[in-house]
C-alpha cells in the first residue's frame, strides 16, 4: 500500500512503480534517514507535538530497525517507493499507531534533502581522508628519492632539470586545494532543511534549531522553498570531485608514461599491475589508465546534475530524484580511485638512474648556461643567442654541454671560462633553484 493511497481508487501499475521507485539507490541512506527521524521525533516530543510515550516508542522502534538492517535481519523491500517509505512503514508494522505520528510536521521533500546532506557530509570526510593519504604517499616517495634529478618538461619536451620530489610536490599542492574545495562545499551544505515541510514549512510549533543542533548542523535553511529544492551542494561537490579527477588523471597519465620502456623512471609493483592474455612480456599500468578513464564518469555526473536542475520551477520536483545516483557515483568513483592509487604509489619503485640519464640528454641545462653568461655581464638576449649556437655546435659534433671543450665554448663567446662546467652541472642547477 502506498503512503498516499487514500486519494486513489486503483493500485499503482507495476511499470509506474518500477519507474518511480528510488529504493534501489537511496537505500544506502537508511542510517541517515533513521538518524534524521530520531532527531525529528525527539523534537516533536520536546515540543509536546507527540506524547512522550509515542516519542519513546518511535525512537526505540527506529533504533531496532537500524540494527536489524545493519545485521542483515531486515531486508529492504526492493518494491518500496523509496527508503523513507520503507522505514516509516516498517516502523508502523512494528509499533502500531505511534509509527504513523512520526511524519507529523514533515514531508519526504525536507526528509530527503536532509538525508542526502547527512550522507554526503560523511562522504566528504572519507574523501578528505583519502586525499590526505595520497598526499602522504607522494611526500614519502619524494623524500625517499630526495636527490633524484629528472628532466622537467614543457610541451613534453625536456626543458629544465628538476628534482623528482619537486615534480611530485606539484601534485600535493593540487590535492591540498582539492581538500579545501571539499571542506568549503561541506561547510555551505551543513544547513538543516528539516522544518521546510513539502515547501511551505509547517503549522506545528516545531523547533528547527533543536533539530539542527541534534544533527550537528551549523544552522537551518532560511527559506523553506529553498530548503527542499536546493541541490547546489550536489553540484558543488560533483564539481570539486571532477577537479580531483582531473588531478588524478594527470598524475595517472604521467605514471603511464614513466613506466613505459621509453621512460622507465618507475616500475609498478606486480601486485598493482596487470598482464596481457597474449603477450607474455607485458606488464600494464591498468590502474592508472582506469583512473584516467573514470574521470569521464565524474564529469558526466556533474553535467547530469547541472542539466537536471537547470529548468525546474520551485519547489520540489521529481526530477530531483536523479540527483542521488549522480552524486553517489561521483563519490564512489573518486573513493575507489584514491583507495587503489595510494598503495600503488606506496609500492612503486623509483629508478633515479634512468631519470638522471634522461636529464643528461636534451640540453636541459642550456638556460643555466645562458644565465652563466649573464653573470659575466652579457645581456640575456645575447647570452640566449650564444647558448643557442653552443647547442647547435653540440648537436653537430655529437656532444653535450658537459663534453664540449672550453676552446669550443670560447670559439662562440670569449666570456666563457672554466666556471661554465660548474654552472651547468645538473646538481648545481637544481640546487640554485632551491629544489
Ligand atoms: N525519492 C524521492 C527523491 O529522491 C523522495 C522525495 C519524494 N517526494 C515526493 N514528493 N514524491 O527525491
Image (tube, rainbow, N blue to C red):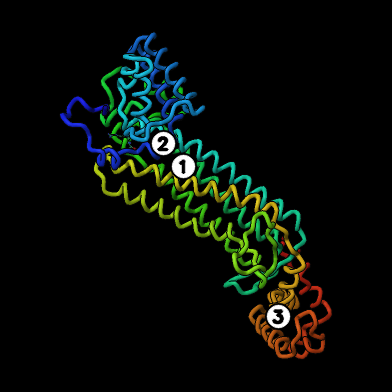
Give the mark nearest the N terminus, 2 or 3. 2
The residue that mark 1 highlights is 185
Q: What secondary structure is found at the residue carrying circle 2?
A: helix
The reply to whether discs 3 and 1 touch (Cβ–Cβ < 8 Å) is no
Residue situated furthest right in the rendering: 418
The residue that mark 2 highlights is 116
Specify whether residue 419 is in view.
yes
- 274, 216: nearer the viewer: 274
Give the mark nearest the N terminus, 3 or 1. 1
Q: Quadrant of the N terminus?
A: top left
Q: Position of residue 272 (x, y in %)?
A: 65, 55
Q: How many marks?
A: 3
Q: Residues under labels 3 and 1: Cα distance?
A: 52 Å
Q: Position of residue 113 (x, y in %)?
A: 36, 34
Q: Residue at x 33, y 34 (%)?
A: 79
- 32, 435: nearer the viewer: 32
Which of labels 2 and 3 is toward the front?
A: 2
Dot 3 surroundings within 10 Å: few (below 14), some, or many (20 or more)? some
Check the image and report above or below for 10 versus 40: below
Q: Position of residue 342 (x, y in %)?
A: 63, 50
The residue that mark 3 highlights is 378
Q: What secondary structure is found at the residue carrying circle 3?
A: loop
Which of labels 2 and 1 is toward the front?
A: 2
Q: Is residue 218 left or right of residue 412?
A: left
Q: Is residue 269 left or right of residue 293?
A: right
The quadrant holding residue 204 is top left
Amino acid at each position: 500500500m502506498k503512503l498516499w493511497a487514500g486519494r486513489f481508487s486503483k493500485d499503482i501499475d507495476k511499470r509506474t512503480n518500477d519507474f518511480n521507485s528510488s529504493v534501489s539507490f537511496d537505500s544506502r541512506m537508511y542510517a541517515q534517514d533513521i538518524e534524521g527521524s530520531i532527531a525529528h521525533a525527539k523534537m516533536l516530543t520536546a515540543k509536546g507535538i507527540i506524547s512522550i510515550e509515542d516519542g519513546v516508542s518511535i525512537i526505540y522502534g527506529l533504533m531496532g530497525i537500524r540494527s536489524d538492517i545493519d545485521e542483515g535481519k531486515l531486508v529492504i523491500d526492493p518494491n518500496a517507493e523509496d527508503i523513507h517509505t520503507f522505514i516509516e512503514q516498517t516502523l508502523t508494522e512494528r509499533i502500531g499507531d505511534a509509527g504513523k505520528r512520526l511524519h507529523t510536521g514533515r514531508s519526504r521533500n525536507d526528509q530527503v534533502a536532509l538525508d542526502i546532506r547527512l550522507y554526503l557530509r560523511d562522504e566528504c570526510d572519507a574523501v578528505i581522508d583519502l586525499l590526505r593519504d595520497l598526499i602522504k604517499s607522494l611526500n614519502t616517495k619524494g623524500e625517499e628519492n630526495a636527490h633524484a634529478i629528472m628532466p622537467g618538461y614543457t610541451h613534453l619536451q625536456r626543458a629544465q632539470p628538476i628534482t623528482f620530489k619537486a615534480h611530485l610536490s606539484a601534485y600535493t599542492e593540487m590535492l591540498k586545494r582539492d581538500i579545501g574545495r571539499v571542506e568549503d562545499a561541506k561547510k555551505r551544505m551543513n544547513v538543516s532543511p528539516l522544518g521546510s515541510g513539502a515547501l511551505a514549512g509547517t503549522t506545528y510549533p516545531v523547533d528547527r534549531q533543536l533539530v539542527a543542533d541534534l544533527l550537528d548542523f551549523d544552522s537551518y535553511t532560511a527559506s523553506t522553498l529553498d530548503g527542499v529544492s536546493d541541490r547546489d551542494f550536489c553540484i558543488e561537490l560533483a564539481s570539486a570531485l571532477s577537479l580531483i579527477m582531473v588531478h588524478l588523471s594527470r598524475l595517472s597519465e604521467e605514471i603511464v608514461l614513466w613506466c613505459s620502456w621509453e621512460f622507465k623512471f618507475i616500475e609498478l609493483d606486480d601486485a598493482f599491475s596487470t598482464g596481457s592474455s597474449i603477450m607474455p612480456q607485458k606488464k600494464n599500468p591498468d590502474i592508472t589508465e582506469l583512473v584516467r578513464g573514470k574521470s569521464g564518469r565524474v564529469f558526466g555526473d556533474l553535467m547530469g546534475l547541472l542539466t537536471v536542475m537547470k529548468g525546474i520551477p520551485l519547489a520540489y520536483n521529481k526530477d530531483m530524484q536523479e540527483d542521488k545516483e549522480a552524486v553517489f557515483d561521483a563519490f564512489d568513483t573518486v573513493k575507489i580511485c584514491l583507495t587503489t592509487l595510494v598503495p600503488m604509489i606506496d609500492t612503486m619503485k623509483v629508478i633515479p638512474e634512468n631519470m638522471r640519464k634522461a636529464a643528461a640528454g636534451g640540453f636541459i641545462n642550456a638556460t643555466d648556461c645562458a644565465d652563466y653568461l649573464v653573470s659575466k655581464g652579457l645581456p640575456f638576449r645575447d647570452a640566449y643567442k650564444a647558448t643557442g649556437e653552443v647547442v647547435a655546435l653540440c648537436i653537430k659534433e655529437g656532444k653535450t654541454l658537459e663534453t664540449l671543450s672550453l676552446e669550443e665554448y670560447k670559439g662562440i663567446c670569449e666570456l666563457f671560462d672554466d666556471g661554465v662546467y660548474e654552472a651547468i652541472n645538473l646538481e648545481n642547477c637544481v640546487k640554485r633553484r632551491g629544489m
